Image (cartoon, rainbow, N blue to C red):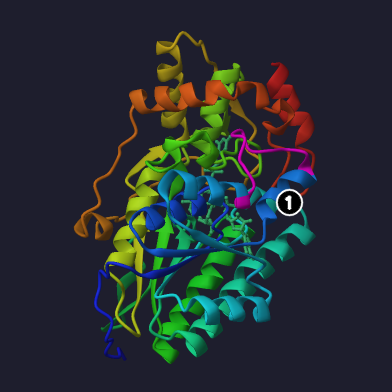
């Protein structure tokens, strides 16, 4: 049942809380809303920085501390961003932040985002599901009790659906069964314990909307690529992080780094794995569209957030060609697939709801890849090459030897 809201949107100045605001997507998002004149606060526990320290890896881009970034943003834009350092699974901390900031919209990026990391050990799987599921559950209680009108914009993932042999809908599907029909959540068959944590989140958020009358938009986002956004391009100190390692680098970003340093592009298995992709600039656009056009009270809605779909092999070919145009000869190599996933499959996912709200996609092109290669080239001396090959296998067993064999073939 939906309740009447007295808030009218879009509001010229909103109190916005960005959870995970020190991350790849969270920091540019915080700047974007701040640039638009909103009152922005950030929560982050720096776990992403810590996970890198634990693995002796790092962001390709030399990112500043959160305090330095916020200071640089103030210098560049004249605007303040407030930071709270802590974990959302720490309820007293989170509750205090919500009580102090009284957000009208919360953008929730604050989770462990890596599938390989979640599959590396029991401890990492438990950490992933605890931080993601319990953190989000805490958030739902804090919203219910402190700011029940607040719009929760939650980053879910396209991987929640898996790769079914039917078209993927935006969150819900009409099912006809034994002469009756109903519209129900789309079946979810995810491929990692990380992706599964997002499914658990989705169920909990849907429940909170149905039972407590909260409002939420679950953005089932595809794989993001790219470095710069309008705001971060203004000053090097505002750069967001950019990862290329086995755990935290996503496929296209990894391929671009590999192309710059002359490493073979690491296509896992046959490379027919098809996913939805989007430019980081479009992540910001989509989140902004969701915030400016909120769900009704009691409504749980799902938008599939990507602009194009590609197979891994197609992406490798785009990067190979773009690199060749800049004088780099790059080899595309098939490595043993560390994951358990379909390497050839049907994939057709609906993604019209954000377009209907006005999304203007930045599509992938060789020109765009060339510009990413150019930015990566500035930081090529920072690449830690040993972090590139996959070492985490979905099923226990020896992978390293197989991968190394492929590497020296
Ligand atoms: P990221 O790791 O760069 O950002 C997440 C941030 O949240 C980090 O700064 C981390 O320190 C913080 N964080 C993690 N757990 C926290 C906790 N319990 N309390 C407080 N802070 C916490 O990841 P990202 O790539 O920016 O992804 C952001 C969100 O978007 C994630 O939820 C991810 O699952 C989702 N997503 C990302 C992609 C992608 O391709 N990058 C695609 C689809 C969905
Ligand atoms: N892959 C390769 N070579 C590589 C890296 C990946 O072939 O070097 C393949 C993988 O096997 C997979 C595909 O590329 O089939 C995508 O892998 P990925 O690591 O880029 O993406 P994924 O593990 O799905 O996770 C990323 C983000 C996650 C987000 C998800 C969106 O890390 O936070 O939720 O993309 S989606 O894939 O739509 O679920």
Q: What percent of the width, then of the height, locates residue 91? A: 65, 79
> Residue 164: which quarter of the image?
bottom left
As drawn, 262 above or below 386: above
> Residue 194: which quarter of the image?
bottom right
224 left or right, relative to 69: left
As drawn, 208 above or below 27: below
Q: Please give the name of the residue rendered at 55% of the width and 19% of the height, measured from the top-left corner.
A: 260
Mark 1, residue position = 50
Q: What percent of the width, then of the height, locates residue 361? A: 27, 44
Whether residue 162 appears in this view of the structure is yes
As drawn, 330 above or below 2: above
Q: Which of 309 and 62 is in front in this view?
A: 62
Q: What stretch is highlighted in magenta?
A: 55-67
Q: Is residue 61 magenta?
A: yes
Ligand 1 has an atom within 8 Å of the beta carbon of the residue at disc 1: yes
Whether residue 168 appears in this view of the structure is no
- Secondary structure at badge 1 equals helix
Q: What percent of the width, then of the height, locates residue 338? A: 66, 41
């Amino acid at each position: 049942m939906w309740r009447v809201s007295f808030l009218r949107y879009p509001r010229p100045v909103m109190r916005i809380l960005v959870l995970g605001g020190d991350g790849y997507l969270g920091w540019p998002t915080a700047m974007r809303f701040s640039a638009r004149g909103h009152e922005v606060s950030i929560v982050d526990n720096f776990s992403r920085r810590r996970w890198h320290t634990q693995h002796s890896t790092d962001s390709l881009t030399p990112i500043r501390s959160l305090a330095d970034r916020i200071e640089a943003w103030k210098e560049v834009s004249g605007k303040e961003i407030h930071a709270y350092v802590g974990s959302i699974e720490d309820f007293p901390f989170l509750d205090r932040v919500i009580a102090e900031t009284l957000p009208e919209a919360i953008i929730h990026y604050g989770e462990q985002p890596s599938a390989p990391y979640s599959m590396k050990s029991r401890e990492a799987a438990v950490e992933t599901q605890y931080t993601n599921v319990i953190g989000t559950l805490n958030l739902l209680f804090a919203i219910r009790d402190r700011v029940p009108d607040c719009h929760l914009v939650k980053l879910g993932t396209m991987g929640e659906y898996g790769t079914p042999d039917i078209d993927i809908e935006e969150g819900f599907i009409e099912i006809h069964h034994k002469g009756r029909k109903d519209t129900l959540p789309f079946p979810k068959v995810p491929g990692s314990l990380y992706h599964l944590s997002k499914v658990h989140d989705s169920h909990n958020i849907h429940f909170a909307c149905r039972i407590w009358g909260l409002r939420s938009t679950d953005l089932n986002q595809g794989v993001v690529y790219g470095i710069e956004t309008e705001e971060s391009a203004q000053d090097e100190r505002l750069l967001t992080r950019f990862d290329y390692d086995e755990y935290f680098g996503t496929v296209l970003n990894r391929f671009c780094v590999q192309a710059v340093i002359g490493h073979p592009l690491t296509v896992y298995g046959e490379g027919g794995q098809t996913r939805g992709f989007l430019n980081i600039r479009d992540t910001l656009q989509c989140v902004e569209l969701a915030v400016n056009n909120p769900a009704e009270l009691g409504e749980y809605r799902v938008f599939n957030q990507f602009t194009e779909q590609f197979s891994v092999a197609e992406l490798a070919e785009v990067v190979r060609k773009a690199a060749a145009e800049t004088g780099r000869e790059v080899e595309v190599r098939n490595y043993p697939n560390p994951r358990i996933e379909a390497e050839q499959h049907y994939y057709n996912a609906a993604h019209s709801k954000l377009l209907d709200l006005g999304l203007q996609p930045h599509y992938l092109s060789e020109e765009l890849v060339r510009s990413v290669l150019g930015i990566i080239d500035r930081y090529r001396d920072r690449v830690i090459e040993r972090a590139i090959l996959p070492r985490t296998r979905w099923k226990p067993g020896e992978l390293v030897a197989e991968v190394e064999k492929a590497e020296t073939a």
